[in-house]
Image (cartoon, rainbow, N blue to C red):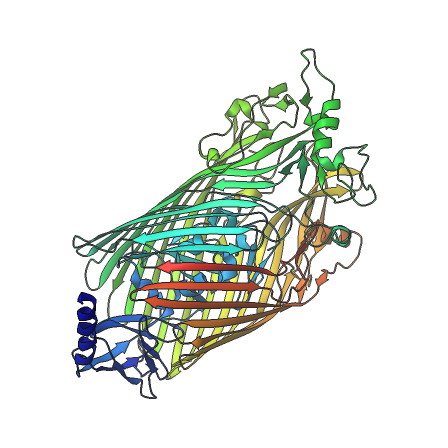
């Protein structure tokens, strides 16, 4: 009877509330124009509608309370809670959606004054932004972080068939060491060589709020090492609202990944906390022998106190992964495109000679101070502590072991099995190492100087890095804004080798630290967590042991004048960088270099004109004097403190760009032209010359010229279709001639000085012509979306070894870069979501290279890298 009464009461209630009506108008945030075709739905139901030509909607509802979800492709979704009486008409008025690039407003603090995003300055640049929504749909999991930007003009990602995190990224043909990467305003390129190692940043996709690539001159005020462009990575900080998610993902190669995240939201006292934890592992990325495992942690605490915002962040991504290198075509033909000659089995246990392991905890503190309505100060203080390295063989490598009975000496030397091409570690340990002679105490030692014995070593690269970026902004008038600031960095790196596996031997005996018979027996685990504190002391190191200090002090300023039609800016920076090294491995006592100081600068200027509503033309120019990387200043392996002679001068970069931008509601098109000249580059290479086995080639004035056109467009067709595309054409060549000094490394004597002509040699490693199309279709608005992306690459040349160019020139020959085959790739993705009140389940799947196309993505002086075949991932996410 009680149940019957309850059912009757519910039925009566449903009769009492018949229906209500909600209406409103959806508008664009910039123009305040109506947005026709926007999707409006009641969360957790199929009840919905779309806006008319005037952006208006009217929706009948059958519940007193609920959540209205308003969405439009290319804009952030807006959720509005409502309460309505029976028969009432609830007018919500104007509902303004936020464009994706402005979705950063959902975080407490990211250092808005030190993060130089494109929209922070009114004078345009060539830039593309990828928001967290697209990152989460397409680039989380067994996907390289740079792949986030693969659908933007003149961004190329290669070497994906290596291990997890071994990809390389190019912008307008310039590699990672010549592209500036910033994390929340913090420079993160390697201080020694400018390189990026994406395995150290494997957790970025989970915590990124947005990634913006600025091609060419960019908007960054820092005197950073950028030739090709700047990539700004903005992480999440403490979220304003309470919520979280749990996600589980699987993929090819037995890939598994689990993630949990929770945000407390801001309390009444202005405090908020956010955290994220993640674990992943895989048997392979795509190629064989590319196992990997890692974690990601993120913790953030924010405090809003009046006109001050503070945010403290701690994050890290400890990982290890086995690597795959380039190979000659004959090995691929014999063993297949997934072949990896870096691993094998030792008494039945898997063993790779090449394992990268690293742990790089990062902390930063952001402080934003709104001094007044006209001025503000932004500061980021940061520190990172990198620990880890990479393994390899030491002594007589597997490829140099003679007498192996099961090998194929015509194809591959040493202890490689002819049947599968893998290293026979059992033979290396049980036969070759066991055959070495013993000393008076019955001990067997590897003697690298005599090429006797094989052990596994770890090449350790530990560093401590501290710095700060400060920016003060003053709005002098409605049209005139001034920024001034400072960029300060302190860096110390330690480099040495340690033993990771003796492979049955008792130690390593070699000439080290002035002792001709130095013996080391201690081994260390090549793991990311153990590497934090457990690494070799000075007495337990092998092969080399040196350190360096790099200190950097820079100041910058920018003035911009802008009204509704015209804008113009001038920007400049000046810096000093000091270098110092000490060598402990080559000498009985520590030898220290002198401290070398080098000054650098950059100056940029530009202007734009909106000559008609939505139509803007702009032009920018810049001149850089960039300090050389430390690895070029100290280039003698036998004495790590010796400064290169002649002394390495600053590199000179000159850039020009001009563009046209048209933007209207739902449609945007950009056309850019660019010219970049990069001169006075220093490069060292080693090889054979005449009868000298160990010759060193010192090039002191290498020049490149990169010029081309870029076109990209994006169109939102109502609330269901988004279509985008790009096309680029470039002409990237080496230019002029360079002096070459040929040195005998055995006694460091000068053998010959000559000039090498580099003119018109094509720059390799990235395609000079490319195109792409992408589409996203809301098959069921606010529930099911499907995306398809196509990328085409041509005019792709192989690695240009300047040493080979030198030999060709010395032999009166004309060097030609190897042209690689053109190729196309198709990627398919889909996402389905369904709501339960304010909670949501999201199922996401991606298939990359769906046609399983075979292609060479890159080459170096050792062979070719094939790109990944078909790979995939699938995830289930619960948001609350």
- Regarding residue 452, the answer to whether it shows in the image is no
In this image, 591 relative to 409: left or right?
A: left
Task: Indicate whether 370 appears above or below 124.
Answer: above
- Regarding residue 174, the answer to whether it shows in the image is yes
Most extreme residue toward the front is: 1
Question: Whole-percent x and y of residue 406?
Answer: 80, 37
Question: Whole-percent x and y of residue 163?
Answer: 58, 49
Task: Indicate whether 693 appears above or below 119.
Answer: above
Task: Indicate whether 834 appears above or below 307.
Answer: below
In this image, 282 relative to 876: left or right?
A: right
- The N terminus: image quadrant: bottom left
Toward the viewer: 84 or 559?
A: 84
Please tell me in which quadrant of the rendered image residue 512 appears: top right
Residue at 33% of width from left, 74% of height from top? 45
Residue at 62% of width from left, 65% of height from top? 767
In this image, 336 relative to 277: left or right?
A: right
């Amino acid at each position: 009877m009680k149940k019957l009464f309850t059912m009757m009461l519910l039925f009566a209630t449903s009769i009492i509330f018949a229906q209500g009506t909600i209406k409103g108008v959806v508008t664009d945030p910039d123009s305040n124009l109506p947005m026709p075709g926007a999707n409006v739905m009641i969360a957790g139901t199929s009840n919905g509608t779309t806006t008319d030509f005037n952006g208006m909607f009217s929706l009948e509802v059958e519940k007193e309370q609920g959540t209205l979800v308003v969405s439009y492709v290319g804009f952030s979704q807006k959720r509005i809670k409502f309460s309505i009486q029976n028969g009432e008409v609830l007018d919500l008025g104007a509902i303004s959606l936020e464009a994706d690039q402005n979705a950063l407003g959902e975080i407490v603090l990211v250092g808005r004054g030190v993060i130089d995003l494109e929209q922070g300055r009114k004078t345009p640049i060539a830039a593309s932004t990828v928001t967290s929504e697209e990152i989460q749909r397409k680039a989380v999991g067994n996907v390289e972080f740079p792949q986030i930007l693969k659908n933007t003009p003149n961004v190329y990602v290669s070497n994906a068939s290596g291990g997890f995190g071994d990809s390389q990224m190019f912008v307008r043909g310039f590699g990672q060491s010549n592209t500036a990467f910033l994390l929340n305003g913090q420079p993160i390129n390697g201080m020694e060589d400018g390189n990026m190692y994406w395995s150290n940043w494997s957790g970025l996709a989970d915590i990124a709020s947005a990634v913006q690539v600025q091609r060419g001159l960019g908007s960054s005020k820092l005197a950073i090492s950028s030739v090709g462009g700047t990539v700004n990575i903005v992480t999440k900080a403490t979220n304003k609202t309470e919520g979280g998610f749990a996600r589980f993902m699987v993929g090819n190669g037995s890939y598994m990944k689990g993630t949990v995240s929770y945000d407390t939201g801001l309390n009444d006292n202005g405090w908020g906390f956010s955290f994220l934890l993640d674990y992943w592992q895989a048997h392979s990325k795509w190629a064989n022998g590319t196992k990997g495992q890692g974690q990601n942690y993120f913790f953030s605490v924010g405090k809003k106190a009046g006109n001050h915002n503070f945010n403290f962040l701690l994050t890290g991504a400890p990982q290890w992964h086995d690597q795959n290198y380039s190979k000659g075509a004959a090995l691929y033909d014999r063993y297949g495109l997934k072949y990896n000659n870096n691993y094998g089995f030792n008494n039945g246990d898997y063993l790779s000679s090449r394992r990268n392991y690293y742990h790089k905890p990062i902390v930063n503190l952001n402080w934003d101070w709104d001094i007044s309505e006209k001025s503000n100060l932004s500061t980021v203080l940061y520190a990172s502590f990198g620990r880890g390295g990479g393994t390899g063989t030491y002594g007589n490598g597997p490829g140099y072991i003679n007498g192996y009975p099961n090998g194929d000496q015509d194809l591959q030397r040493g202890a490689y099995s002819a049947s599968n091409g893998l290293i026979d570690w059992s033979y290396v340990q049980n036969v070759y190492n066991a055959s070495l002679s013993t000393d008076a105490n019955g001990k067997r030692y590897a003697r690298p100087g005599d090429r006797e014995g094989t052990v596994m070593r770890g090449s350790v690269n530990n560093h401590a890095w501290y710095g700060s970026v400060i920016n003060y902004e003053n709005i002098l008038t409605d049209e005139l804004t001034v920024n001034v600031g400072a960029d300060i960095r302190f860096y110390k790196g330690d480099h040495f080798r340690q033993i990771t596996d003796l492979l049955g031997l008792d130690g390593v005996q070699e000439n080290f630290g002035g002792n001709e018979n130095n013996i080391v027996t201690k081994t260390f685990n090549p793991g990311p967590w153990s590497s934090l504190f457990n690494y070799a002391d000075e007495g337990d190191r092998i092969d080399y042991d040196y350190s360096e200090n790099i200190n950097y002090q820079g100041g910058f300023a920018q003035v911009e004048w802008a009204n509704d039609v015209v804008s113009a800016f001038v920007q400049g920076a000046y810096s000093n960088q000091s270098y110092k090294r000490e060598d402990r491995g080559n000498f009985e006592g520590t030898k220290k270099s002198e401290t070398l100081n080098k000054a650098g600068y950059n100056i940029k200027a530009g202007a734009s004109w909106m000559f008609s509503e939505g139509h803007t033309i702009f032009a920018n120019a810049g001149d850089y004097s960039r300090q050389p990387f430390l690895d070029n200043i100290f280039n003698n392996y036998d004495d790590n403190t010796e400064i290169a002679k002649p002394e390495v001068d600053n590199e000179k970069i000159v850039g020009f760009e001009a563009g046209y931008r048209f933007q209207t509601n739902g449609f945007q098109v950009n056309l850019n032209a660019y010219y970049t000249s990069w001169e006075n580059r220093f490069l060292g290479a080693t090889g054979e010359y005449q009868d000298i086995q160990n010759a060193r080639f010192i090039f002191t004035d290498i020049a490149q010229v990169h010029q081309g056109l870029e076109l990209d467009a994006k169109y939102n067709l109502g609330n269901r279709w988004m279509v985008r595309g790009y096309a680029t054409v470039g002409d990237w060549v080496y230019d002029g001639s360079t002096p070459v000094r040929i040195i005998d490394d055995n006694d460091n004597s000068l053998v010959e000085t000559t000039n090498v002509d580099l003119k018109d040699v094509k720059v390799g490693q990235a395609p000079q012509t490319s195109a792409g199309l992408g589409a996203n279709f809301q098959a069921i608005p606010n529930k099911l979306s499907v995306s398809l992306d196509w990328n085409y690459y041509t005019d792709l040349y192989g690695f240009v070894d300047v040493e080979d160019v030198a030999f060709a020139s010395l032999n009166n020959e004309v060097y030609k870069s190897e042209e690689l085959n053109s190729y196309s790739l198709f990627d398919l993705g889909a996402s389905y979501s369904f709501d339960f009140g304010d909670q949501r389940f999201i199922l996401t799947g991606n298939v990359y290279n769906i046609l399983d196309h075979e292609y060479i993505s890159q080459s170096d002086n050792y062979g070719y890298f094939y790109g990944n075949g078909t790979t995939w991932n699938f995830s289930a996410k619960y948001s609350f």
